[in-house]
Image: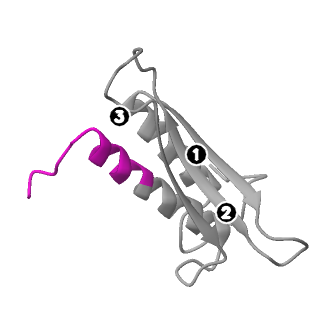
Amino acid sequence: MRKVGWEDSSSGPDWIDVEGMMRAIRAVHTGAIELVVRPTGIGFGTGVDVLARARFDALPDSSLPAEVEVCRGWPCDQHSRLVHHCFALLYDLDAAIGKQYKQTTLLE
């Protein structure tokens, strides 16, 4: 299927991959997943902050967090395109959720 209306194919992730990753994190962790892009500084050319957030239904007075988030500025030295930055940030969000809920890998 051609990804009409999103973006031309590239050697890295595209916006369909970002959407798929968001859905996968939601399915695994049963939380609402958000990506927020907000401008930094004043004027054009100052970049953006990208916030990846997971919101969970938490019981009152629960020791578990109601939300977990990670935020990184773009442009950055690791990602030439915003879509790549967003995709990588979702991986960071997944890891942050695991740390908050004390999940570990089998290899630790």
Q: Amino acid at mark 3?
A: Val
Q: From what the image shows, is residue 69 above or below residue 73? A: above
Q: Nearer the viewer, residue 59 or 17?
A: 59
At x 75%, y 52%, the residue is: 4
The tag on residue 103 is none
Where on the picture, by quarter, is residue 57? top left
Determine the CA span between mark 2 and mark 3. 26 Å
Q: Position of residue 105 (x, y in %)?
A: 15, 51
Q: Are marks 1 and 3 in contact (CB under 8 Å)?
A: no
- N-term-proximal mark, 1 vs 2: 1
Q: Residues within 10 Å of mark 1 (few under 14, many from 20)?
A: few
Q: Position of residue 82 (x, y in %)?
A: 66, 68
Q: From what the image shows, is residue 66 above or below residue 105? A: above
Q: Which residue is mark 1?
A: 19
| Residue span colored magenta | 93-108
Secondary-structure class at tag 1: helix
Determine the CA span between mark 1 and mark 2. 19 Å
Q: Which residue is mark 3?
A: 28
Q: Are marks 2 and 3 in contact (CB under 8 Å)?
A: no
Instruction: Indicate yes or no whether the magenta region holds residue 105.
Output: yes
Q: Is residue 100 left or right of residue 107?
A: right
| Image depth: mark 1 or mark 2 in front | 2
Q: Which residue is mark 2?
A: 49
Q: From what the image shows, is residue 107 above or below residue 48? A: above
Determine the CA span between mark 1 and mark 3. 14 Å
Q: Is residue 99 left or right of residue 74?
A: left
Q: Amino acid at mark 2?
A: Asp
